[in-house]
Amino acid sequence: MSRSDTAHASPSEATRPSSRDPHSLVGQVAIVTGASSGIGHAAAKALAKAGASVLVNHPPTAGSMEKAAAVVAEIKADGGVAAALGADVSKEEQVDAMVRETLRLFGGLDIMVANAGIERPAPIHEMSLSQWQAVIDVNLTGAFLSARAAAREFLRRGPQPNLSLAAGKIVFTSSVHEFIPWAFQANYAASKGGMMLLMKSMAQELAPMKIRVNSVAPGAIRTPINAASRDTQAEMEDLLSLIPYGRLGEPEDIGRTVAWLASDASDYVTGTSLVIDGGMSLYPAFRGAG
Ligand code: NAD
């Protein structure tokens, strides 16, 4: 596969910037890490729907491989282009190899969605070093390694005005816990707080080279990562009481925002964390008070 033979792209379509639909990602190539489930799955689908060829990353573990293959099959059934690849985002050599393989498969890289993440909750006085380290390794170091590998490629190959106004786009999946403290999840909140300043520092540094760097900061989204927190009706009601908009977020709520942040429609947006939380961060406990 190459840029010129993707399912959606005709070369003429991909080379006329002025007439290009600003939401179109035709001819572009995206990597989505942790894309075999949840938000990554939805982001991969939204990017493919907009015309990008998508590398569906998953951790190199048994069950994930099958799930990633199913995501690729879904995208192909919709007429899109995708391939699955196992790589642990916390491992430098695996992330760099993932980018090399993407270039070999699709002939370029335009969009990196650093989405992979885990939770390892524990009271702070009982949190083991391995619980702390596992979350920092995947959520923060994994995001750094993915974004760095993408930035290196964007800088090496320079702007591609026939494809996009920016020379490359990086989108992190952060969380409202980049600014809301989270008891029993100090490792997770620290990883997302770190991600916020990683994103902003990279955005500041790379803007002159026309590389845009942003985050999505989801609230409570219905995915496997938090399934245990809504097992019972009471737990679900507790969660909903935190969300003024009155419903849980769906992965697609985040996926389409990722596709927007990766497109020319958001060309003047860089260094921003886009909160997508149904109002969760609007201090809902204050409703009716005062
Ligand atoms: P999820 O568990 O479905 O997705 C996480 C993905 O990361 C999984 O596919 C998993 O296989 C992958 N992953 C884990 N370790 C990896 C590794 N070492 N290398 C590669 N991939 C790895 O849950 P999700 O909610 O879709 O989570 C996606 C992102 O969204 C995470 O960064 C999470 O912190 C963030 N987030 C989720 C919510 C929510 O409410 N669901 C809210 C805010 C932020």
Image (cartoon, grey):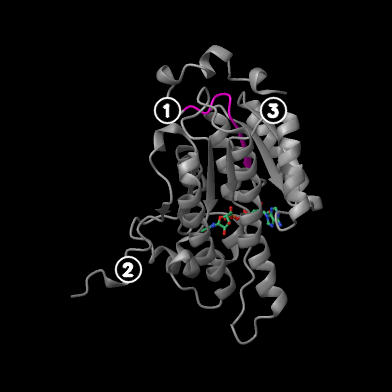
N-terminal of the pair, mark 1 or mark 3, is 1
Residue hosting label 1:
22
**Coordinates of residue 210 in the picture (x, y in percent):** 48, 39
Q: Secondary structure at mark 3?
A: loop
**Coordinates of residue 195 in the picture (x, y in percent):** 53, 61
Q: Nearer the viewer, residue 215 or 244?
A: 215
Chief secondary structure of the magenta portion: loop
2 and 1 marks in contact (CB < 8 Å): no
Q: Nearer the viewer, residue 232 or 273?
A: 273
3 and 2 marks in contact (CB < 8 Å): no
Residue 221 appears in the picture as rendered: no
Asked if the stretch drawn in magenta spans residue 116, the answer is no
Residue at the far right: name it.
62
Residue 283 tag number = 2
Query: For mark 3, does the 10 Å Cα neighbourhood hold few (<14), some (14 to 19), or many (20 or more) residues?
Result: some
User: Residue at left 72%, top 23%?
Assistant: 1
User: Residue at left 61%, top 62%?
Assistant: 140
Query: For mark 1, does the 10 Å Cα neighbourhood hold few (<14), some (14 to 19), or many (20 or more) residues?
Result: some
The mark closer to the camera, 2 or 1, is 1
Asked where in the image residue 191 lies, by quadrant, the reply is: bottom right
Q: CA distance from mark 2 to mark 1?
A: 35 Å
Q: Quarter of the image containing the C terminus?
A: bottom left
Residue hosting label 3:
107
Per the rendered image, the range of residues in magenta is 24-31
The mark closer to the camera, 1 or 3, is 3
Q: Secondary structure at mark 1?
A: loop
Question: Mark 2 is on which residue type?
Answer: Tyr
Q: CA distance from mark 1 to mark 3?
A: 22 Å
Question: Mark 1 is on which residue type?
Answer: Pro
Residue 53 appears in the picture as rendered: yes
Q: Is residue 282 above or below residue 99?
A: below
